């Protein structure tokens, strides 16, 4: 991981759970804010899906620490 996660940072959230996907975005990315750092490779997130109520996801691992079929977060690309 290139930088340490900290509370308040904006990240991208991805989920394979169809019940949490919306607005044609499929798995993501969905904007999310880190609300708590729970480990070296996981965080609690507040997810902000378009046209839906924000919700919480706990213990979400960073992309580097998961299989492709799991939910995860990653840093947004810099342009």
Image (spheres, rainbow, N blue to C red):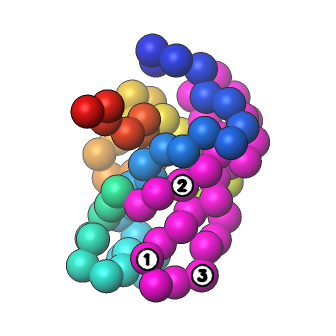
x then y, percent, for residue 34: 65, 45
Stretch in magenta:
30-56
Front one among 3 and 44: 3
Judge from the rendering whether residue 16 lies leftward or rightward of residue 50; answer left or right. left
First along the sequence among labels 2 and 3: 2
Judge from the rendering whether residue 73 lies leftward or rightward of residue 27; answer left or right. right
Judged from the image, the secondary structure of the residue bearing numbered disc 2 is strand
For label 1, the residue is 50
x then y, percent, for residue 78: 32, 31
As drawn, 61 above or below 51: above
Residue furthest to the front in view is 79
As drawn, 42 above or below 70: above
Quadrant of the drawing holding the C terminus: top left
Q: How far apart are marks 2 and 3 (CA)?
A: 12 Å
What residue is drawn where x is 68% and y is 42%? 8
54 inside magenta stretch: yes
């Amino acid at each position: 991981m290139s930088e340490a996660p900290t509370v308040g940072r904006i990240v991208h959230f991805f989920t394979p759970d169809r019940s949490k996907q919306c607005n044609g975005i499929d798995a993501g990315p969905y904007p999310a804010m880190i609300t708590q750092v729970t480990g070296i490779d996981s965080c609690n997130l507040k997810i902000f899906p378009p046209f839906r109520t924000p919700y919480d996801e706990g213990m979400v691992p960073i992309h580097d620490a998961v299989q492709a079929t799991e939910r995860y977060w990653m840093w947004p690309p810099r342009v």
